[in-house]
Amino acid sequence: MTDLKQLVEQAKRSELFTAPHLEADLATFLAEQGGAIKTLAAEAVASGVKHIYFVGSGGSWTNMYSAKYLMERFTTIPSDALTGYELIWRDPARLGPDSWVFATSYSGNTEDTIAALRHAKSKGARTIGIAKRRESTIKREADVLIDYDSTALYILPLATVYLFALEVARLQGNKAVEPVIEGLMALPPLLGRVYRESEARAATLSEQFSDSTLLYAVASGPLYGLAYKFALTVFMENIRIHGSVIASDEFRQGPVEALDRQGMDIVFLMGTDESRAMTQRVLDTVRKRPNVRTIVYDMADYPDVHPLLAPFVLLIPLQWFVVYSALRAGIHDLDERVFMGRGVLATGEATWP
């Protein structure tokens, strides 16, 4: 059997294990595209855009959730975060020349997202694509393109919509966003430190949870999108086990009733924002049950980071956990997929999903 350390070194070259190079990639991206993103924000404010739609599929949609969260909290421009086909099926009455649509896809060819982009253009909306720097449908068809020369398919689109939303708020006179912007620009060195410090714990946790067949992810506030990403994409795509996401304040509605009959393995993402108290209540409740195992990733361990930047930070220990868990499960090629992008669920020129 191949040595685990050797497999980890191999995993560091995987396209989907992005943590090893996030420090450099985020610094480069902010230097290269920060000005363009701020210009886009200025255009949004000056043009009087009436509504912004943030569209993505799978993990890309979770970035868009964070964009809506910030836009609603800090700006006066209404927004929605939708999957590609949801935008088409809903066909919002407000979608038109006074609206913008951000469409993000790592490949630039995701079927759902391309369909939504074309639908938006047919309605006269302005379209902004976010994708990896390569030839793609989004590159050809979006009105504006923010691209990146990296495999950091979560952090860099997330940085794009964060900086856009925060800059819109700043231009509208909201001074509360200034420390968040400063914190975002200062993140790269911290991400490097978190990467270096997170491996040992991940190795231990992956062994302890190697028999898990279902992982719940519990979070709220700015971390809900990250919890969704790992529960409904990464746990299932990379470890090939079941995953489910639960908002902290919804845990008492149904999940709590399952505690008496079945064991649960739960990953908690603890923020330092307003949602922390509720997540802590859930954690305190489940820890009283002998058949519940928990993993806690806590932003209190990073007191110098603004609470709203939590998704950038906690992505890294989560990725480390998934890498070790996948390797222990015998999945040595983290980029391998059984169905996705193999034509099994694809139609036409685009891949599904």
Image: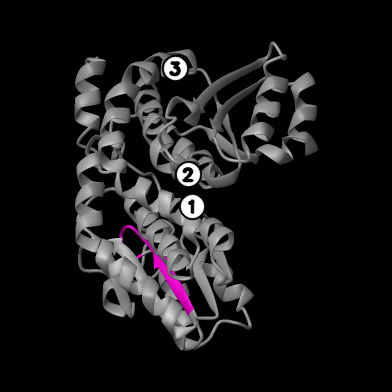
In the depicted structure, whether residue 47 falls above or below residue 305: below
Residue 64 showing in the rendered view = yes
Q: Which residue is mark 3?
A: 205
**Residue 185 at x, y percent in the picture:** 30, 49
Q: Which mark is residue 62?
A: 1
Q: CA distance from mark 2 to mark 3?
A: 20 Å
Q: Quadrant of the C terminus?
A: bottom left
Q: Residue at x 47, y 80 (%)?
A: 120
Towards the viewer: 283 or 164: 164
Q: Secondary structure at mark 1?
A: helix
Q: Is residue 186 left or right of residue 315?
A: left
Q: Secondary structure at mark 2?
A: helix
Amino acid at dot 1: Thr
The total number of labels drawn is 3
Q: Is residue 24 left or right of residue 59?
A: left
Q: Residues within 10 Å of mark 2 (few under 14, many from 20)?
A: some
Q: Which residues are magenta?
A: 100-109
Q: Which residue is mark 2?
A: 233
Amino acid at dot 3: Leu
Towards the viewer: 72 or 144: 72
